[in-house]
Image (tube, rainbow, N blue to C red):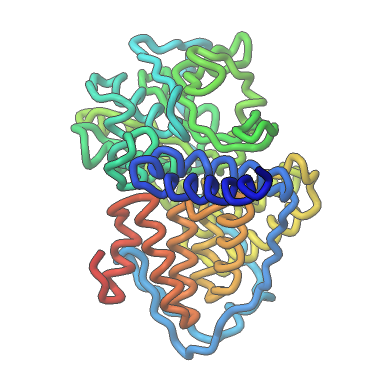
Amino acid sequence: MRKRLIWIIPAALLLMIGLYYIPPIHSRLAWRVDDLRAKIKHYFNPPSEVVFQPSGAADLSIETVILTTRAEYLLTLTPRATLTPLATSTPSQGPTAKPTITSTPLPVSVILKGVKYVDQRNRWNYCGPANITMALNFWGWKGNRDDVAKVIKPGENNPNMNFIDQGKIDKNVMPYEMTGFVSDNTDFNALYRVGGDMNLLKGFISAGYPVIVEKGYYERDANGSVSWMGHYQFVTGYDDAVQSFIVQDTYLDGPNFKIKYDEFYEGWRDFDFLFIVVYPPDSEQKVHDLLGNWSDDEWANRHALDIANEEITTQSGFGAFFAWFNKGTSHALLQEYVDAASAYDQAFSIYATLDNVKRPYRMLWYQTGPYKAYYYSARYADVIDLATITLDSVIGGPYLEESLYWRGMAYYMSGQTDLALDDYYAALKVHPNWIPATQALQDLGVFP
């Protein structure tokens, strides 16, 4: 009997393994196995304890490097002092004009009517599609959250998986993807800016325009830990009497949730005070009037930089980390990459001193400015190290197309073309037909 068991147990294990890899079974179980593996890894190697330490070293082995990003501009990097780790930041010149002051006093309370609440229940990482759906539905669009996700969060291209399971692999939706969906797939317009403020939001709401914001907050995650996460919220009202905004929260807080101004502001800081406005095309002039100086994208970026510079002098701990990170983000948006890299270096040095339980270790899930700053400062090793930490230690696998893309770009510039190709293909597995990865492959003569 004992001898029989010795043979039966291995045979059963082999049979189970064989069954697992049968395509229909594998497609249904693979993500669950990956999820369990991630939870085990998270338990024994908490991602909040992993710290990225920038080397600050630029790769100046090539005399002149010409870099492009999505055919928008060319940037020439030459071996000079401004590319060294000791480069000093250029002082901000400040906004070219002061923010527009509304001549008519704002109402003390506004609650917009006609809002149709949409949640993200029974879906994964769906606050982006749910929020942009609410914004579009407000103006009469008839689509739903899945219509949005099928375009901007399609997930794994596996016909053996249902749509919900396909989308699980894609962990985040970026603001440009949300506004791009509106512009490319509906009859409405959309824009996003950084450096927003509370009165600007109130001005939009009082004029009848709800606004999406991106914020940070602490919540219990899928691993059972209370940790920092990024989240979109649809702002549809405010009430000065109770010092609160009224938001449609797609996750736990639900519809018409009141959040205090100071708490709202603290979370909004985590994303450089980013906001998104969706509007009908015949409202173009009205929206730009409401934006005032924010209608100029460069002015908004410079204004956000000034906010960060001011907060650096007043914040400490987590607030200082986010202020320095925002400084880097604003410099990156202004294409001041060496200054951006220097600011991000300071942010990461502060990060290493923070409470390792509450560290916002998911930052690179949602914000990719450091990749761009280090890449365009020729600091390819830092791009590779940061992306590898994010993919392996934080998210637990190749599930962020942006991290894969930028690591691939850095691999290529470091002469590791095979690794670059692997990352581009992995990015397309997460997000099929994603333009940056597709373009990168085509630049190498590969047509996916």
Q: Along the horizontal axis of the image, is 443 left or right of 92? A: left
**Total residue callouts:** 0
Q: Is residue 325 above or below residue 441?
A: above
Residue at position x 34%, y 46% in the image: 23
Residue at position x 50%, y 21% in the image: 249
Quadrant in the picture for residue 438: bottom left
Q: Nearer the viewer, residue 321 or 120?
A: 120
Horizontal and vertical percent for residue 187? 19, 32
Horizontal and vertical percent for residue 313? 74, 48
Residue at position x 65%, y 50% in the image: 3
Q: Nearer the viewer, residue 225 or 51?
A: 225
Location of the C terminus (image quadrant):
bottom left
Q: Is residue 300 above or below residue 111?
A: below
Q: Is residue 387 above or below residue 148?
A: below
Location of the N terminus (image quadrant):
top right
Q: Along the horizontal axis of the image, is 405 left or right of 139? A: right
Does residue 202 appear anywhere in the picture?
Answer: no
Q: Along the horizontal axis of the image, is 429 left or right of 199? A: left
The extreme front residue here reads: 1
Horizontal and vertical percent for residue 276? 41, 35
Horizontal and vertical percent for residue 107? 48, 12
Residue at position x 68%, y 36% in the image: 227
Does residue 119 appear anywhere in the picture?
Answer: yes
